Image (tube, coloured by chain):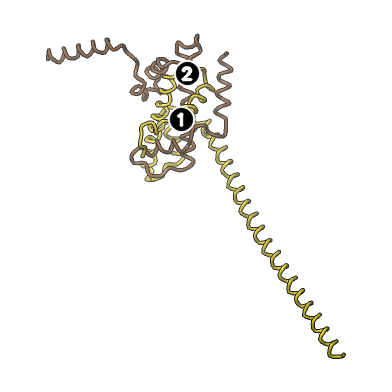
Amino acid sequence: MAERPEDLNLPNAVITRIIKEASTCPLREARRAISQAASVFVLYATSCANNFAMKAKRKTLNAGDVMSAMEEMEFERFLQPLREALEAYKKGQKGKKEASEQKRKDKEKKSSSTDENDKSRDEEEDEHMDDEQEGENEGEEEDVEN
Amino acid sequence: MSEKTMEEKVEQATNSKNVSLPMSRVRLIMKSSPDVSCINQDALFLTTKATELFVQHLALSSYKNGSGKETNTLSYSDLANAAEETETFQFLTDILPKKILARDYLKSLEEMKKDDDSL
């Protein structure tokens, strides 16, 4: 739960940017009012979507509930852009997931290849030690002959 | 600035893949609503995007119908007018009330009191 009432408001800078993309220069009072209107919109949309979820006996709000809420609130004009945005978002999420899985696989490959390197180094050392031992044996034999 | 350019701009903004508003803040507001337990990630994204579209829609509508066209600005009264006149913005009338002068308000209070007394 939010401690202060300001926490329930969306950042002013972002609101200003969105308005500027749509129209022109908003006065300070208008900016604050739009910010509050946006928060109220979120609450209204959430409450509407929640009604749809409860009707379907679900506890989790899903994308379909939000779309139905938009229709209920008479914002059908948003439905098409929202559908497109959701498609793009899902693709982006999928891409991210695949990328992180790829990273994980690469990591596993790397760690397994370093294990192999260590093994081969150990084998070389063993061979070296055997050579040294052979050398010593030869020396002893020579002494004996003399 | 011609209207066509403005509408093109709006289209551009709505077609962007990412959202500008922070989803964490939107989730906070959604959770403050009673009876809401879990929110799907897609639902959160849609709500955030819808809020952005709403902000643009509100700003554009208010600006078009408002008196700020000449000065190229958006004022509070433009918003309050849009809230009262447009059906889809009716839910905003409580938080975007029209401004009245203090003396007019006090006058109306007195008149109300008189009515009560006469009863």
Please identify the residue farthest to the right as the structure is shown. A146
Residue count near mark 1 (Cα–Cα under 10 Å), binned few <14, some 14–19, many ≥20 = some
Please identify the residue farthest to the bottom as the structure is shown. A145
Q: Is A110 left or right of A65, judged from the image as shown? A: right
Which of the two residues, A83 or B38, is positioned nearer the viewer here? B38
Mark 1 or mark 2, earlier in chain:
1
- For image coordinates 55% across by 15% down, the residue present is B3
Q: Position of residue A86 (x, y in %)?
A: 53, 37
Q: Amino acid at mark 1?
A: Pro
Among the chains pictured, the one given yellow colouring is A
Give me the chain letter of mark 1.
A
Give me the chain letter of mark 2.
A
In the picture of the structure, the residue carrying the numbered disc 1 is A11
In the picture of the structure, the residue carrying the numbered disc 2 is A26
- For image coordinates 43% across by 26% down, the residue present is A35
Q: Amino acid at mark 2?
A: Pro
Which of the two residues, B36 or A65, is positioned nearer the viewer here? B36
Q: Secondary structure at mark 2?
A: strand
Chain B: its colour in the image is brown
